[in-house]
Image: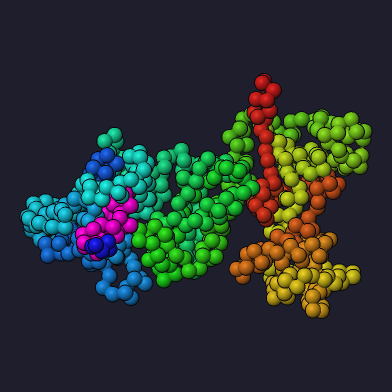
Amino acid sequence: MAGKIKVLPDDVKSRISAGEVVEGPASVVKELIENALDAGANDISVSLLQSGMKRIVVTDNGEGMLREDAPLAVMDHATSKIADVYDIQSIGTYGFRGEALACVAAVARLTILTRHKSEAIGTKLIVENGKATVADYAGAVGTTIIVEDLFYNVPARKKFLKSLSTELRYCRSVFTNAALANPQVSFVLTTEQRRHELSRCDTPQERLSQVYGKTTTERCCFEELRDLQASVWGMLSKPDYLLASRSMQQLFVNGRPVEYRYLSFLLSKAYEAVAPKGMYPAAVLFLTIDPALTDVNVHPAKREIKLFDSKYIDSLIMHVARKALDKVHTINDNLLRQVQFNKEHTLEPEQTSSAEGIGRYGGGTANTSAENPLFPMGANIVREAEQFYKAVSAATDYLVLGQIFDTYILVQKKTELFFIDFHAAHERFIYDELKKREEAIDRQELLFPATIDLPSEYFFIIADNLDCFTKIGFDIDTFSENSIIVRAAPAVVGRIDEKAFLIEAADNIKQNNAPENVFDAIAASAACHSANRAGDVMTLRDMEDLAAKVFSGEHELRCPHGRPFVHAITKEDLERIFKR
Ligand code: ADP
Ligand code: MG
């Protein structure tokens, strides 16, 4: 009986391995566009028939191929881009494996029309069933690659393809990503239905608005973060622009679109205060980093990339997203803009008489607070209010109305009513103050130094970072094997629950252990455990101080953990509610 095991013929072997690089039309489109970019093209056109299954044509105006090189281009592991294994460390081109064209040639009919800039006559190369024929080609400098009948000789492969419309969507996304990463190149995508043209752009921002449209880019902001080893730039949702899918989240690393599986997680974390469950921000981010810190050689289709210091990259991504959110949340940038637009309709507090102003909102007499549980201001506060009202209204254009639900301060400013979560606001101001005082510290000795026992994990985190606590204004030291002594605290912090503070600080440091974040972690925890708690009674003067800080435009209107603490309702909003 004859044996059952056979060695596969070479052409079958090559088709099997080609199937791993060429997953479908989108991966062919990706490889061909990348080759065009590597050839220095600045005009690239892609045309697809039946989602690329019937035909893919990619034309570029790059440098072209020499007659003698064209047949080599379709041989396995033939590349003009790296000479030896050491070059892989510093790849400046998209391609380097020299296998894409060989793989495509193994699973489709391939035609190359090309003319090198140094040659008068171009080359036409047709590869079918492993055989190549060469002829003259009279055309412009550049290259056209035609791929027909994908998988005609690997029927099994076709079973893994999705519907034509899904494959087309994949092709479009490859096209879009290439266009986003290369704004200086013009791109055209033609299908049976449509021609999509992206002209050359001067800036990446221009390309983003070409691709996503003006309405989308207006609902996003552009933010950049630079560091010594890397920088990240991109377009990020404003807090009110959220999508039901993650489809508009993409990371580029050195111009290469990559699937970074933590991107979405990081973005959700950064936006957690503003994004309800199931809603996602848009974020198209471009990371520029020393190529030595990355490895693109981990996936045959180069879709994934290994980042050697992913913690560092993660913190860059988080920070740029936070920065974008914070920018939108500063009062000058956003909340007050509306007030300016509505100037003509503005009701100035000065226009109302002082008695009416107070009476209407805060209660003109001592017992109004009892009648009006919405504004539980104590009698002395109401009296204080009367005294302060004139002085305050002369200097400012807002009126503090009182404290509600033991949590919010209500302020009327022109035609808007502001709700300020005062605990969160206070946290922010203390935090900002602590950060400012990293050098000149104003300390307050504790009457009785506090000795605090801590679980050993927390004890060691704090012991390792004592100098950071000192720089921010604490006088603390290790006391025994597992306890810390606190002798003084920064003056702005005021009273503090030392134990809760130390535990939270240790926890925060543990979570963001980059050295530059330790200060943030300590400042945020100190702010949190010192700030006025919801339920504390504030005097009118406290509230005035707080409002002044909110409207000064000097602070981000989010607590150090990222929660916004100001919400405005306009007069128009109310009129809409009351159908006036
Ligand atoms: P790689 O891009 O990894 O080098 P490919 O199989 O994609 O491998 O391409 C093989 C070679 O063919 C390239 O190194 C390049 O020299 C040449 N080539 C492919 N496409 C083009 C093009 N559009 N213009 C000029 N040369 C090309
Ligand atoms: Mg290539």
Query: Where residue 538 appears, x then y in whole percent?
Result: 84, 47
On whether residue 31 falls in the magenta region, the answer is yes
Residue in the picture at 35% in, 58% down = 301
Q: Main secondary structure of the magenta part?
A: helix
Residue in the picture at 33% in, 75% down = 86
User: Which quarter of the figure is the C terminus placed in?
Assistant: top right
Query: Where residue 248 appears, x then y in whole percent?
Result: 46, 46
Q: Which residues are magenta?
A: 7-32
- Whether residue 559 is visible to the viewer of this picture, yes or no, is yes
> Quarter-wise, where is residue 495 in the image?
bottom right
Residue in the picture at 24% in, 62% down = 1
Q: In the rendered picture of this protein, how many numbered marks are placed on residues?
A: 0
Query: Where residue 524 appears, x then y in whole percent?
Result: 70, 60
Residue in the picture at 21% in, 61% down = 9
Left or right placement of residue 271 versus residue 445 in this view: left
Residue sitting farthest toward the top: 580
- Whether residue 6 is visible to the viewer of this picture, yes or no, is no
